[in-house]
Image (tube, rainbow, N blue to C red):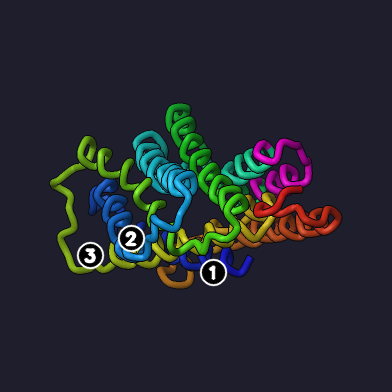
C-alpha cells in the first residue's frame, strides 16, 4: 500500500505537468516514446537475463507492452474523439477491469472487490462528471481498450511475481520497457508528427522528469505495490489519482475545481477502501501475490 500511495502522489504531480507544459505543444507519440527510452536508461543496465527464466522475461515484456505501450497509445487516440473531461470520466472503469481480471486469474468470483471498486467508480465519477458530448461512442470504446490493457498489465505483473517469488524485480524490470518500446516505437514512426518536437528547455525538463521518475521509478514501484495488496485495493487505488490530481492542480496551478464534489467523491473513494479492507480481513490470504 505505501508504494501505491507514493506513486499516486507522484503521478498526480506528473498529470498536471503534462497538461500545463506538453499537451498541444509536443507530439503525444514522441512524448510517450521519450518516456519509454528514458525509463529504459534506469533498468536496462540492471538486467540480468542469464539469471531469469525465459517465461518470466516474456511475461514482463508482455505486461510492459500492455500496461505502458498499448495503454498510452489508446489514451492519446481517444483524445481525438473525446473532450478532456470525458477522457477523465471514462478512465474510472479501470478498477472494475482490475477486479474482474484478478478474479478470472484466480479462477473464482468474489463480489467484494467488484462492489468496492464499483463504489470507487461512483466517487470518481462524482468528481469528474462534467457532461457527455453526443458523439463519444468511438472514443469511449478506444479508451475502454486502454483501461483494459492498463488493468491487464497490473494484474498480470502481480500474478507473474506470484509464480516467481524469488525474483528481485529490479533485475528483470527492464523487459517491461522493452515491451513498451515494441509498441511505442512503431506507433511514433507510423503516427507521430515530426513538426511538434520539443522546442524549449522546459519541454525537455518535463519529459526528463516524466521519463526517469514518473515512468521509470513510478511504474516499477506501482507494480511492486500491486504484488502486495488484494485486487480490490489495487483497483480502487487506480481511481485515487483523480482526487489527488485535482488537489495538486488546485494548490499549485490554482485551477478551478468544485470543492464540494471533490470532497464528496474523495470521501466515497475513501469509504470504498475502508469497506474493502474490512471485507478482505474476513478472508485472510487473499492478495494478488498469493492464491486465495
* Labelled pair 3, 1 in contact (Cβ < 8 Å): no
Rendering coords of residue 77 (x, y %): 35, 37
Res. 202 in view: yes
For marks 2 and 3 on the same chain, the one whose residue lies earlier in the sequence: 2
Q: Residue furthest front?
A: 50
Return the residue at label 1: 6
Q: Give the magenta part as a residue range.
A: 104-121
Residue 153 magenta: no
Return the residue at label 3: 204
Mark nearest the camera among 2 and 3 is 2
Rendering coords of residue 160 (x, y %): 56, 48
Mark nearest the camera among 2 and 1 is 2
For marks 2 and 1 on the same chain, the one whose residue lies earlier in the sequence: 1
Rendering coords of residue 228 (x, y %): 64, 60
Return the residue at label 2: 44
Mark 3 residue element = helix
- The label shown at residue 133 is none
Amino acid at each position: 500500500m505505501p508504494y501505491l500511495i507514493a506513486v499516486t502522489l507522484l503521478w498526480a504531480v506528473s498529470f498536471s505537468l503534462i497538461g500545463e507544459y506538453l499537451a498541444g505543444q509536443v507530439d503525444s507519440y514522441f512524448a510517450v516514446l521519450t518516456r519509454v527510452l528514458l525509463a529504459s536508461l534506469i533498468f536496462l543496465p540492471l538486467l540480468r537475463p542469464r539469471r531469469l527464466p525465459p517465461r518470466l522475461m516474456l511475461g514482463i515484456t508482455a505486461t510492459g507492452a500492455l500496461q505502458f505501450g498499448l495503454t498510452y497509445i489508446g489514451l492519446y487516440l481517444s483524445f481525438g474523439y473525446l473532450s478532456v473531461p470525458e477522457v477523465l470520466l471514462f478512465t474510472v472503469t479501470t478498477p472494475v477491469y482490475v477486479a474482474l481480471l484478478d478474479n478470472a486469474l484466480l479462477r473464482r468470483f468474489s463480489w467484494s472487490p467488484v462492489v468496492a471498486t464499483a463504489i470507487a467508480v461512483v466517487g470518481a465519477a462524482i468528481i469528474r462528471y462534467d457532461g457527455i458530448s453526443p458523439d463519444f461512442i468511438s472514443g469511449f470504446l478506444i479508451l475502454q481498450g486502454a483501461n483494459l490493457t492498463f488493468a491487464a498489465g497490473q494484474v498480470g505483473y502481480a500474478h507473474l511475481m506470484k509464480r516467481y517469488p524469488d525474483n528481485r524485480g529490479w533485475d528483470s524490470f527492464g523487459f517491461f520497457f522493452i515491451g513498451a518500446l515494441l509498441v511505442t516505437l512503431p506507433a511514433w514512426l507510423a503516427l507521430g508528427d515530426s513538426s511538434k518536437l520539443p522546442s524549449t528547455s522546459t519541454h525537455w525538463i518535463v519529459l526528463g522528469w516524466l521519463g526517469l521518475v514518473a515512468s521509470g521509478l513510478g511504474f516499477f514501484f506501482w507494480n511492486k505495490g500491486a504484488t502486495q495488496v488484494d485486487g480490490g485495493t489495487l483497483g480502487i487505488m487506480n481511481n485515487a489519482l483523480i482526487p489527488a490530481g485535482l488537489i495538486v492542480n488546485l494548490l499549485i496551478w490554482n485551477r478551478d475545481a468544485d470543492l464540494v464534489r471533490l470532497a464528496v467523491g474523495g470521501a466515497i473513494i475513501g469509504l470504498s477502501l475502508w469497506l474493502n479492507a474490512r471485507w478482505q480481513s474476513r478472508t485472510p490470504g487473499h492478495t494478488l501475490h498469493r492464491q486465495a
